Image (spheres, coloured by chain):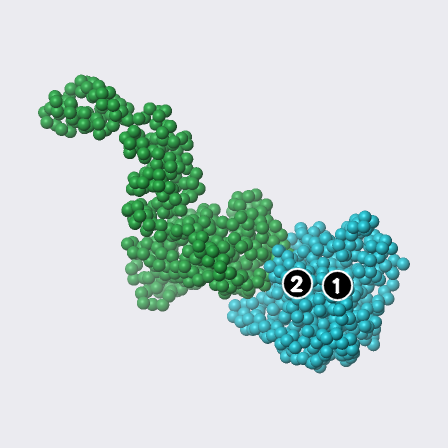
Amino acid sequence: MADDLTRLTAHELVAAYARGEVTPSEVTRAYLERIDRLDGRLGAYLTVSREAALAEARAADARYRAGAPRGPLDGVPVALKDNLCTRGVRTTCASRILEGFVPPYDATVVERLRAAGAVLLGKTNLDEFAMGSSTEHSAFQPTRNPWDLARVPGGSSGGSAAAVAGGLAAAALGSDTGGSVRQPAAFCGVVGLKPTYGRVSRYGLVAFASSLDQIGPLTRDVRDCALVLGVIAGPDRRDATAVDAPVPDYLAELEAGVEGLRLGVPREYFAAGIDPEVERAVRAAVDVLAKLGAAVEEVSLPTTAYGIAVYYILAPAEASSNLARYDGVKYGLRVAGADVVEMASRTRAAGFGAEVKRRIMLGTYALSAGYYEAYYGRAQKVRTLVRRDFERAFAAVDLLVAPTTPNVAFRLGEKEDPLAMYLNDVFTVPTSLAGLPAISVPCGVSAAGLPIGLQLIGRPFDEARLLRAAWAYEQATPWRARRPELA
Amino acid sequence: MSARAAPAVEVVIGLEVHAQLLTRSKMFCGCATTFGAPPNTLTCPVCQGQPGVLPVINRRAVELAVRTALALGCRINPTCRFARKHYFYPDMPKNYQISQYEEPLAEDGWLEIDVGDTTRRVGVQRLHLEEDVGKLVHEGRFETATASLVDFNRAGVPLMETVTRPELRSPEEAAAWLRAFRTLLLYLGVCDGNMEEGSLRCDANVSVRRPGQGLGTKVEIKNLNSFRNLRLALEYEVARQTRALEAGEPIVQETRLWEAEGGYTRPMRSKEYAHDYRYFPEPDLPPLRLAPAWIEEIRRGLPELPRARRRRFVEAYGLPAYDAEVLTQTRALADYFEAAVRAFPRPKVVANWIMSELLREVPGDDEAAIAATPVTPERLAGLLRLVEAGTISGKIAKDVFVRMLRTGEDAETIVQREGLTQVADTAALERVIDEVLARNPRPVEDYRRGKRAAAQALVGLVMRATGGRANPALVNRLLEEKLSRL
């Protein structure tokens, strides 16, 4: 029975609460029990806020009894990636350097989830500072894929994806810089959305690459994704890059279908190197959408091949700057030294993992006098070309349809070469560089039983149409009903 | 010692001035900017550089910078950008400073200064906004400190950096420029100009060359917190560089610190500054676009600027140039003068009183003190009217002025209570004169023998007998009549 409760989606839970069939406390206890039982193997959580979650659930019980739920997520147990600041709850970014860090404030998205009534279960694992594609680069533990514990859940929001897929949270938030929501969603068989840059406030998201970072939902189905996005999206006076545009009602148009929509299939996303199983599943998904009434045509995004190169200059450059503040002076780890310079350098040597150090060095180099134009300056120019590619494509079509990743979940330890790991983001990085919204929905299963993700990419701030197409596809296919057997 | 000792050398100086803007809140967060609060009480996650925080631009700071840029005749860039400037130092919460680099708020302006009898226009290269850093408090002396504490109250306070072109030709010119710039800031109400508290800070770039040669290697001098220190440090540095030039020794491009107590500059340790700031556009702040209509609105709100006011004081009030300069040194003082002239329309008399009496008691560059003085312009005018009417003498008036400052009362009240009215009663004065003449036969005798100067001694004696209250002109006339009749 308890496991059945943890199979429900957020919208199903809210409906069941409203009908009085089950209470937020019962559901929260079921999740906590499942975390106790299974997370030792999965490693999705870094911190579980048991008492706070139960208290929040009891408050939600009372609101439902009074017939006055607080908001659209009242009583829904949600997990947060551990790079989202939570007042009074430690926020580590899966890094030794922030091991003991307890933020004095809530991120804007956390405030908005609380205001909507969500029960916050805890903080999920990630690649240190969100730098990685497998969640193996956490300083504390790897997270495993609920479909096959020998495999990675993807990353960097691997903890959030594994928690939602494994029934350890009804929904979760992750952050996506170059694919960190979409790729783990694809690997774990859940829905993951990276909103348009500026759609969701970044205030309280520990910065990795400021011009790319966006917070997005990881959910069991597309309707939940629309629900959570509606709660967290919108302008914020604390984030100058959060766009001052009204938030549409994402649920209102969800069932409008794809009839008449023009879909573009980018040729370059089916290039050599893609796993044939992934290609077959994605092409089949395109056929489903065509049968549902969408017009499909092939388009070209010629700069696709340069995305990774551009990304691995710009993102580390920004990261090298954003991570400068971790010096042992104000918070987190401090390793003593003879003077402040030595203290900062020892603290950083001990506190950052190898991948983080690699990116700080790459970024510092790219911004150095004499190299700035050749690296950062040139990468910015190519970024503009990438954006123009998409603009040209969107002059002809409404949405782009592509694989989320070139392959399914790989084994832990399989990609030790950093470059091999980076290449995993080849289909997600260009959209990040262009600041566009993109969603990953399950679209099949490999012979080994591993999920495959379909990526839909939209125009800026066109999340409503993205969700509409994703919902239509999801309803027409059986993938959403699949759950991994963990028990 | 100074540059004058070596006329074969040309001096090239440029200044970089940081002014704390008079905003209520910080550059990128809502914390207050009050000076002197207990450590770290004026901080929040944003100005502490907590993980995950983001900056938001203070509109008022932009407005004050635009106002200054307009007063300097700068071109305001329709779009400007913030940039990150990186170096590790524990007083800087993020280990980068949000500043402006390639696209500053404004460029290409000028400010006039007087050099001898001529006026020179000194170019302003750029003006931009940035945030201030915090403060380290060392236990004991810096060199031997075993612990340091950091206070972030000042971190994030809005700073406006103004950079001149390298067009200043002597330490005196540099000091004159800084003085003129400070006056401008006070007129504009954008900075309190307090150099001791660090609201106005100056760094200087200086080089020397032989006439006709290319620019010499420049040296940056930091820590110049007064006009005097600016001049002394530059004089020291010019002399040092001149000696090196003449000895054929190389001048190293470096940053030097002015040690005010010892009166010398020394190279900063490499840990105290960075060689490569790795600037790049601040991704947390979109480019700042300034609406032309807003800039025009700010332009319309500009006050009359110091030099224009100075010219007007000469032309409209007939004041000597020196008086006009003294009286326009701050907006508060110039306002005081004009208000007093409105109430007592004899500008030169008012100017003399302000310069000799008011400024003896109140510093002319202390806007707050001038605004707060109990001798308001109207009260000063009241005092001057009593002198003009002959009710009190000019000498008594000076005493009354001091009492007005102390008590906060008006002149009329003090004069009445203290019985300071001049004795202008002819009969009463005649009685006093008769008595003086009777008691002092010696000077009377001298006068009779043709020693005219003896009359002055007698005037003095009459004045003393009346406690200084006698109308001196009347005493002169009456005494002359009596003596001639003898």
| Three-letter code for the amino acid on which mark 2 is drawn | Arg
Depth order, front residue of B481/B399: B481
Chain letter for the cyan colouring in the rendering:
A
Dot 1 falls on a residue whose secondary structure is: loop
Dot 2 falls on a residue whose secondary structure is: loop
Q: Residue B482 placed where, x, y %?
A: 15, 23
Total count of labels: 2
The answer to whether residue B120 is left or right of residue B64 is left
Depth order, front residue of A365/A222: A222
Question: On what subunit does the disc labeled 2 rest?
Answer: A
Depth order, front residue of B99/A10: A10
Q: Which residue lies furthest to the right in this view?
A: A1
As drawn, A330 above or below A487: above
**Would residue A345 be seen by someone viewing this image from the given angle?**
no
The answer to whether residue A213 is left or right of residue A368 is right
How packed is label 1: few (under 14 Cα within 10 Å), some, or many (20 or more)?
some
The answer to whether residue A3 is left or right of residue A194 is right
Residue that appears at 83% across and 49% down: A65
Residue that appears at 41% across and 40% down: B370
| Three-letter code for the amino acid on which mark 1 is drawn | Leu
Which residue is identified by label 1? A251
Q: Residue B336 placed where, x, y %?
A: 38, 42
As drawn, A133 above or below B318: below
Which residue is identified by label 2? A199
